Image (spheres, rainbow, N blue to C red):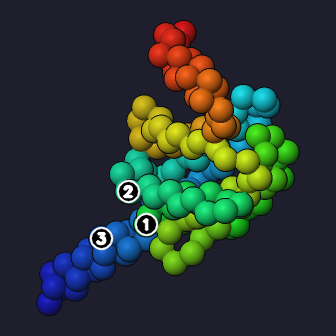
Amino acid sequence: MRFLYALLFMFSLLYANEVQGINVRNIEVYSRPPERVDIMLAFDAPYVEDIQQETKEGYETIILKNTAIQQEETKSIKALGIEAIQITQLGNDVYIILLNKEPINIQASKIVDGYGLRFRVTTKPNKPVDRIKEGLKSLSPTE
């Protein structure tokens, strides 16, 4: 009988961890005008879930599936046409909402060990010539 209780207890712990998902331990926002804004998130486990992005008039949303944060955060940013960044929990997901006046690009990358994500926000070029220049920059080798 003890074995059965121990087995049930172990399964309940495994199930609880799976439902909770990954927890955000730290959030940092670095504004580096005029080029970019970096949003850095650190997790308590490697991030392996899906990332979704939604674009609407006046804001961009990044959705981190099966992720939790301790408390909602709002950061005022006055760079790249971004007014504010709000990070909030909705259901089992974390939403990063960027209120922006101008079109922006968001590029996600994992930190080497998977315990962190970086979202790099840059302006989206409006003119064809600017788009070509932006494309040429991305082909240049980085140091």
Viewed as shown, does residue 109 lie left or right of 59? Answer: left
CB under 8 Å between discs 3 and 2: no
Residue at left offset 60%, top offset 20% = 133
Cα separation, mark 1 vs mark 2, equals 7 Å
Q: Amino acid at mark 2?
A: Glu
Tell me where residue 59 appears, x and y as whole percent. 67, 60
Crowding at label 1, few (<14), some or many (≥20) Cα neighbours within 10 Å? some
Q: Which residue is mark 2?
A: 49
Cα separation, mark 1 vs mark 3, equals 15 Å
Cα separation, mark 3 vs mark 2, equals 17 Å
Tell me where residue 102 appears, x and y as whole percent. 73, 48
Q: Which numbered disc flags the more N-terminal residue, 1 or 2?
A: 2
Q: Which residue is mark 1?
A: 66
Q: Which numbered disc flags the more N-terminal residue, 1 or 3?
A: 3
Tell me where residue 121 appears, x and y as whole percent. 64, 40
Q: Amino acid at mark 1?
A: Asn
CB under 8 Å between discs 1 and 2: yes
Query: Helix or strand or loop: what does disc 3 sit on?
Result: helix
Residue at left offset 44%, top offset 55% = 51
Rendered image quadrant of residue 95: bottom right
CB under 8 Å between discs 1 and 3: no
Q: Is residue 134 visible?
A: no
Q: Which of 117 and 56 lies nearest the eye of the viewer?
A: 56
Rendered image quadrant of residue 1: bottom left
Query: Helix or strand or loop: what does disc 1 sit on?
Result: loop
